Image: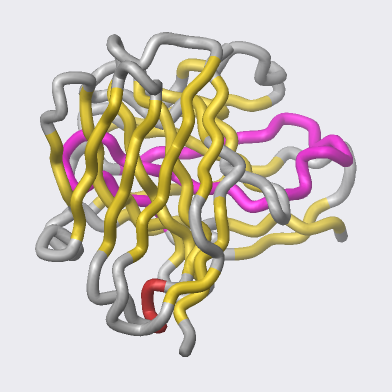
Amino acid sequence: QVQLQESGPGLVKPSETLSLTCSVSGGSIRSDYWSWIRQSAGKGLEWIGRIDSSGTTNYNPSLKSRVTMSIDTSKKQLSLDLNSMTAADTAVYYCARMASSSWPLDSWGQGTLVTVSS
Amino acid sequence: DIQMTQSPSSLSASIGDRVTITCRASQGISNSLAWYQQKPGKAPKLLLYIASRLQSGVPSRFSGSGSGADYTLTISSLQPEDFATYYCQQYYSIPYTFGQGAKLEIK
């Protein structure tokens, strides 16, 4: 059973870059797709983007100009960078697994709350 | 983007009731539809995928149906642990999108 764990700063200043890591255990990082999703009170659940084991990415057009995702298969880690943070980016950020390219999010991390404030 | 609209946004029901939540996509999504359950402070949990396939370990009182742009989630006999918020999600096209959620509360 794959397990995911997000980590990163709980507080980010406006205009700064958020960097989050998702550690994958109990399964292979090489055979699946990996998504980042966020949840805020104002916008509900929002899919940020996905990455596969080769590093191919697809981003939500609404965030594409500010997002970078990467994968380190040797460390079994995913990374999310989101720049130019504003208060509107305050949310719980989740990483999740997709078993194939057109598949639901079948395993989720517990989520990490990120607050944007000076 | 494909817009997902759930109804109702909230509902109250009693233990043992049959409950149905609907999800309408802004275009056909060829059954690429998942349902999730979320409890406070927890991540969403996958219940059904391909509109009607039950995820492993999910009780059989949960079922899904639909086609094209219209889908439903049915809970046949509500149990205490079912009171939560339910979301639909399309994975037919990128960007994947979610419904706004349906909060199920105890009457």
The foreground one among B40 and B21 is B40
Q: Position of residue A87 (x, y in %)?
A: 41, 83
- Work out whether A98 lies above or below B29: above
Disc count in the image?
A: 0
Q: Quadrant of residue B81?
A: top right
Q: Is residue B7 visible?
A: no
- Residue A52: image location, x then y, percent: 21, 25
Q: Which residues are magenta?
A: B70-99
Q: Residue at coordinates 15% horizontally, 20% vertically from top-left?
A: A54
Which residue is painted at 28% across and 81% down in the image? A15
Residue A26 placement (x, y as % from top left): 55, 12
- Whether residue A35 sits left or right of residue A67 in the image: it is right
Q: Is residue B84 magenta?
A: yes
Q: Is residue B31 visible?
A: yes
- Rendering coords of residue A69 (x, y %): 23, 44
**In the image as oriented, which residue stretches furthest toward the bottom?**
A118
Q: Is residue B72 above or below residue B95?
A: above
Q: In the rendered view, does B59 fall on the left or right side of B13?
A: left
Q: Dividing the image into 4 quarters, which one contains the N terminus of chain A? A: top right
